[in-house]
Image (spheres, grey):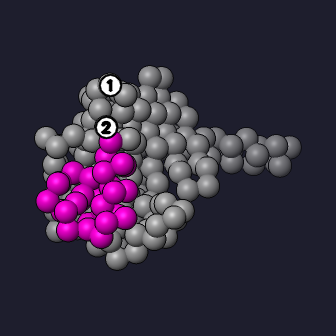
Amino acid sequence: MHVCKFIIFSFMVLSLSVQADTLVLSSKLKLDYPTPLLISHTENTLIIKYKETAISHNIVTPKTMYTDIDLTGYEQDYIYALFDKKVNKELPEPIKELALQQKKTMGLNEKIGVFKKTDYFEILASYDERQNIGHVFILEEHNIHHLAVDGSQEYLNKIINGIAVR
């Protein structure tokens, strides 16, 4: 009987912890988000699912982001190049071409720039109305986070506003 109560209690505690509204992204960064219907984790991606929206999070790793090109040493400039033509011109040719292709695939537009900048992080984001998806890149000193928001621009704005220093 005690084992059964412990199992039920453990299940309740685990269920409550999944419904948390704050995701710790790093030692200095957090994401406050609306309570989801489901949270799932795959190899390198965390998925937060809502009725009409899904958010995915992953860490951009320069060696594995693309199989043919190692972005080590260029990872921050590469992300900036997705949003700024001037930065793209300064990159080596294979990385420049990759940034142009990625920008087109993701539907990133030139009008969007920095949403937030603090001493600890910077946010670059864009929303593609045709694909109904937004992309958020959070640049920290040693990490780059990528959030894809599959849904409305309103949800994208909620997520951007939920990113803060811990």
Instruction: Name the residue furthest front.
Output: 93
Identity of the amino acid at label 2? Gly
Q: Is residue 44 above or below residue 103?
A: below
Does residue 46 sit above or below 134 in this rendering? below
Indicate the position of residue 88 as horizontal and vertical percent values: 22, 60
**Badge 1 or badge 2: first in the primary sequence:** 2
Percent position of residue 11, x then y: 68, 43
Whether residue 88 appears in magenta in the rendering, the answer is yes
Left or right, residue 115 beside residue 68: left
Name the residue rendered at 16%, 48% in the picture: 113
Q: Which residues are magenta?
A: 77-104
For the stretch drawn in magenta, the main secondary structure is helix
Q: Secondary structure at mark 2?
A: loop
Quadrant assignment, res 109: top left
Q: Amino acid at mark 1?
A: Arg
Residue holding disc 1? 130
Q: Looking at the figure, which quarter contains the N terminus?
A: top right
Residue 139, by quadrant, is bottom left
Question: Residue at coordinates 48% horizontally, 23% vertically from top-left?
Answer: 51
- Could you tell me which secondary element the residue under label 1 belongs to? loop
Residue furthest out toward the right: 1
At 68% from the left edge and 48% from the top edge, which residue is drawn?
10
Q: Position of residue 132 (x, y in %)?
A: 35, 27
Within the magenta stretch, is there residue 103?
yes
Q: Is residue 29 visible?
A: no
| Observer-nearest of 131 and 124 | 131
Residue identified by numbered label 2: 107
**Label 2 near label 1: C-beta < 8 Å?**
yes
Give coordinates of residue 161: x percent, y percent: 23, 43
User: Which residue is outermost to the bottom?
Assistant: 73
Q: Nearer the viewer, residue 1 or 35?
A: 35
